[in-house]
Image: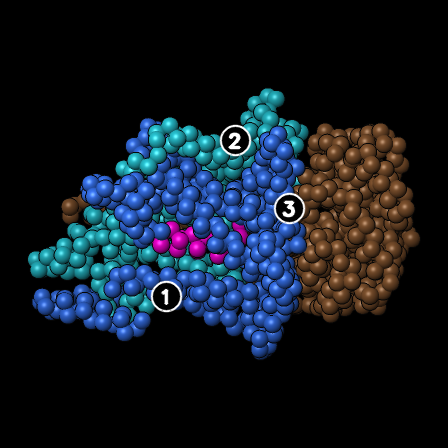
Amino acid sequence: MKKKFSIFAALIMALSMILAACSNSGGSGNSGASGEDDNSGNTVGGDKVKLEIFSWWTAGGEADALKALLKGFEEKYPNINAVNAAVAGGAGSNAKAVLATRMQGGDPPATFQVHGGAELFTWVDAGKMATLDKLYEKNGWNGVFPQKIIDMNSKNNHVWAVPLDIHRGNVIFYNKKVFEENGVQPPKTFEEFFAAAEKLKANGVTPLALGDKNIWPATMLFENTLLAKLGPEKYAELWTGEVPFDDPAVKESADIFKKMLGYINENHASLAWQDAAQLVIDGKAAMTVMGDWAEGYFVAKGWEPKKDFGWIETPGTQQSFMVINDSFGLPKGVENPDAVKKFLSYLGTKEAQVTFNKIKGSIPARTDVDKSKFNVYSKSTIEDFQAAKENSSLALSLAHGSAASPGFLTKVNNAVNVFVTQQNVDQFISKLKQASSLLGK
Amino acid sequence: MQSVDTNNAANTITKFNKKGSKPLSRDRWLAVLFLLPSLLLIAVFVYGFIGWTGYVSFSNWNSLIPDLSFAGLDNYFYIFQTFRFQSDIRNMIFFTVFFIAVVVFLGQFLAILLDQKIKGESIFRNIFLFPMALSFVVTGVVWRWVLNPKTGVNLILDNFGWTPEWYTNTAVVPSWDIFQIQFGLPLALISVIIAAAWQMTGFSLAMYLAGLRGIPDEHREAARIDGANERQVYFKVILPQLKPITFGVIVMMLHISLKIFDLIYTMTGPGANFVTDMPAVYMFNATFQGNFYAQGAAIAIVMLLLVAIFIVPYLIRSRKGEA
Amino acid sequence: MTRTFSKGVVYAILILFSLCFLVPFYVLLVTSLKPFDEVSFATMWQLPSTIDFSSYAKAFDKLAPNFWNSVLMVVPATLLSALLGSLNGYVLSKWKFKGSEWVFTALLFGMFIPYQSILIPLIQTIQKIGLYNSIAGLVLVNVVYGIPLTTLMFRNFYASIPESMIESAQIDGAGFIRIFRHIIVPLSITGFVVVAIWQFTNIWNEFLFAITITGNNQHPVMVALQNLAGSQIVHWNIQMAGAILAALPTMLVYVLAGRYFIRGLLAGSVKG
């Protein structure tokens, strides 16, 4: 008996100790500067500076794009080891939690993915970011990024982040075959949209596919109606408080949003956006409103742009471009600010912007790149981006964190989720109005 | 309770003291000493952090900038006034009650079947235990597919002319209007209950199976000799002896259901009109997406208080059982 | 044995329930064997046109480095929490002192805290003691939050060991430690099995702590599994293949130790 127990106890202790030791050494090996598991292959000595690049790009095209970006960077700066610290989770929700806890805990990553605009500003206001004015000057970026995009990344007369990619949020993707079979044209106005929707519905096709399990796709639908009804200027003034949420145009938008909800698939709450896009592929639905990453999904499913699917701006937003932007900034208190600045400088180069965006299916934030390198869809987006820049009709996305603070957005998402079911316009407007006190925060 | 307790402890002490008191007192110290590390860890990691959360819940910290100035009960007033939180409380109550009921009854039922000395018992048992090996994250994804109203089981049920809306159903039964919400069982929750029960029934099955095997056959035989039929044997002999097991199952399931997060997050999300939302999901949303740290903390504290309401009766009960 | 139903009915019901229980596994398996362009809600019941193992290869590539991390984490965490739990259970069932019931209650309450709510102070604490970003930190956290559960299980288990055994050992002059080593532990091997299985599964599948406490090189497999899904497009075939791979160790544990699981519960449940 005694022996048995001693062996048992010794086993437990030994095992735990060995494993604890293993895990400890694993931990310290990582936090040190040397890079045994670094994948560049050309490690020289132990003096490589390690940078943690934090994002939520963990899979598919976005992960490949990030990988290519980091590879390009390491070729240029072999002494800096840019580590991919991507964290998963639906549209970055887990990543944001991890980031928030790390920043609160005083352990910021070298740089992190953030939506330009309000989401970035919360970090600026919290005093967690360092300014990049000099970096912009040095790299001569003030002329090459559109002013509106620089503004998205600036606050208090300082610029805080480098824009890497742009996605467009006001796009309807449609199944060309379904449109043809039902004799429907891509709708430019709401009148045309509802006429088409009526026709499709009568023929037993779901006009508009929506997958709002995670709520934000419904919020996108609403923000695009807002943009159409208010126009880019007034739309922008919503977020500064100059236009109140009980403005008649907002109410009208809510009415239209409600009417659109009459043409969506019944099971919308059970679907994510990509399941909704699948309905379009399967021909069960005709259209879906989504950011242009949907194009990446269609292509991954073997669809050809312009042949199998077409796209058009959401009704009434032909002249506008709903901007969804990912930027990277410099947190205060990082170990190697100079190395981080090198990385950020690289992000702003034509080379990096083309490499990354070509793979991800987004477009560069710079407007002076060679668009011939991009596919059909991206080319047309780049042209629209250019045109919208000249008409100053770039609009910031609410659903994707740029237009208003995360606090406001959370409340709007809650209100939208209730509205989609209850469809009570007055209640919806009053909830928006209530939440608008959070706009400044 | 306190007095019962001390009596109990005093009894034990006198009992022990009857036999050689010297080494015993040293042993008592040793006992406490061995308990100490766990106590310290729990004191810091549970109570310390609950204290921190409580402190934050009374503060104005509702942005990324920590602001620990005193806000009184503002955050509590706020969350209780929201449609979402009212829905969450309702959902949590109904989910907990029905989930536990299903797990207890189904587990017991299957255990009784498996206890009939059947062939292939271990195969059946493993099938029922298997889901426990998965994480809720995986369970959520799979059941989201299976119970999707347009596909999934409905493709099969359609043949019988019945296509329930599963977790997209926004109806609440019965729907009494209370505050801003309708009170009752949100039908969408049934899908979540099915998924959660699928995963956890194996545990209660195992517990009951062990319990059944622990009841000596003589007890049953004795009852049968006394002329009891099988139904009476079950209700009079077996069921009473399974009581402690039922309690064990309930506690284990309570701690899963009250904290349920991963399953909801991956399977349904908050649901249309918040019919499948849970306090933990709201808290995660408020804290890490909206930066409402104080409101999130208030939600956590309310959750803890609800836990206390559920759990304290159990603790009292279980102590009585030992007295 | 309870003869409540006829054998035929029993088999029929068991088979029916087994089929229901296997449905989700069927979906997992079938989807994981499909190429991406065949994956959709509409065709979820259909068998793949050709069996395609490439999802497994892709998932395995991404998960493999994290498997070892999970092992490094789950083994010490399971053993340590079982050890602490058995000590606590022993003290709280056989060496009751004034207020020990309250201590037990206080420990037990720790089981019920929603972990999301304590994430920020937890991370700050882990950082202060220098275990942030390490598997050791994750082990600590899983052990700490496992204490309430393991204590509860062991305490119930030990309640079934008769007082008289302890008393007679004391008459023979055995003390606290010797009684534990020579009476309690040998009698509770099955208890250890139950607790270890339970903790192994919980810790293996734990996600929230894993993603927040460890950095990239230390992520356990559950985090890597989540990372298989991007923020935009989810390749369900790879995701489900990954889910099956990630669940293999726990499934194996249930198959191999399922019998001991019941036996352990049986040994401990005489008194509940």
The quarter of the picture where residue A58 lies is: top right
The chain under label 2 reads: C
Q: Nearer the viewer, residue B288 or A263?
A: A263
Residue A423 lies in magenta, yes or no? Answer: no
Give SS at disc 1: helix
The quarter of the picture where residue B146 lies is: top right
Disc 3 + disc 1, Cβ < 8 Å: no
Chain seen in brown: A
Distance of mark 3 from mark 2, alpha carbons? 23 Å
Q: Which residue is mark 1?
A: C106
Which shade of the palette goes to chain C? cyan
Distance of mark 1 from mark 2, alpha carbons? 43 Å
Q: Are marks 1 and 2 on the same chain?
A: yes
Q: Position of residue A210 (x, y in %)?
A: 73, 44
Disc 3 + disc 2, Cβ < 8 Å: no
Give SS at disc 2: helix
Q: Earlier in the sequence, mark 1 or mark 2?
A: 2
Q: Residue at x 48, y 38 (%)?
A: C246
